[in-house]
Amino acid sequence: MPRWVQKLNKLAADWLDLPPDVTLELPRITMIGNRQMYIENHRGVEFFSAELLRLALANGALEIRGRKLVIRAIMPEEVLVEGIVDELKLVGMPTG
């Protein structure tokens, strides 16, 4: 997405008081302790093992590292992950 479109979306979100995950295509991550995660706004699974889950995002990727990771449910833009989560990492996400 071009940078000017991102800025326009941010202005619209601020003006209309919309949540940024909706207008800026950002992931929404809900965690219950380090045992369960619900991720919205992903673009697909790039890699999965019991120790690493890599989800594609609109602008980059989300890496979840842990132990005994299991995908309990997966939908077009949502995924439910269980296991012991040790680390979350946003890769390639623009800053600013």
Image: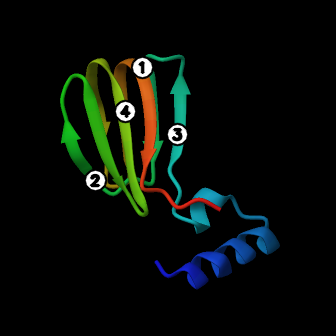
Are the residues at dot 3 and dot 4 in contact (C-beta closer than 8 Å)?
no
Q: CA distance from mark 1 to mark 3?
A: 15 Å
Q: How many marks?
A: 4
Above or below: residue 13 compared with residue 42: below
Asked if residue 88 is positioned above or below residue 91 in the image, the reply reads: above
For marks 1 and 3 on the same chain, the one whose residue lies earlier in the sequence: 3
Is there a contact, CB below 8 Å, between mark 3 and mark 2? no
In terms of depth relative to the viewer, which is nearer, 5 or 23?
A: 5
Q: Which mark is residue 17?
A: none
At label 2, the amino acid type is Gly
Q: Which mark is residue 29?
A: 3
Q: Say whether disc 1 or disc 4 marks the residue closer to the N-terminus.
A: 4
Amino acid type of the residue tagged 3 in the rendering: Ile
Q: Which residue is mark 2?
A: 44
Left or right: 68 in relation to 92: left
Q: Quadrant of the C terminus?
A: bottom right
Across and down, in percent, residue 41 comes to 45, 54
Q: Nearer the viewer, residue 60 or 28?
A: 60
Tell me which label, 2 or 4, sits earlier in the chain. 2
Sooner in the amino-acid sequence: mark 3 or mark 4: 3
Residue that carries the numbered disc 4 in the rendered image: 64
Amino acid tagged 4: Ile
Label 2: which secondary element: loop
Residue 88, image x and y in percent?
A: 45, 33
Give how far across and how far down residue 43 sits, in percent.
Answer: 33, 57
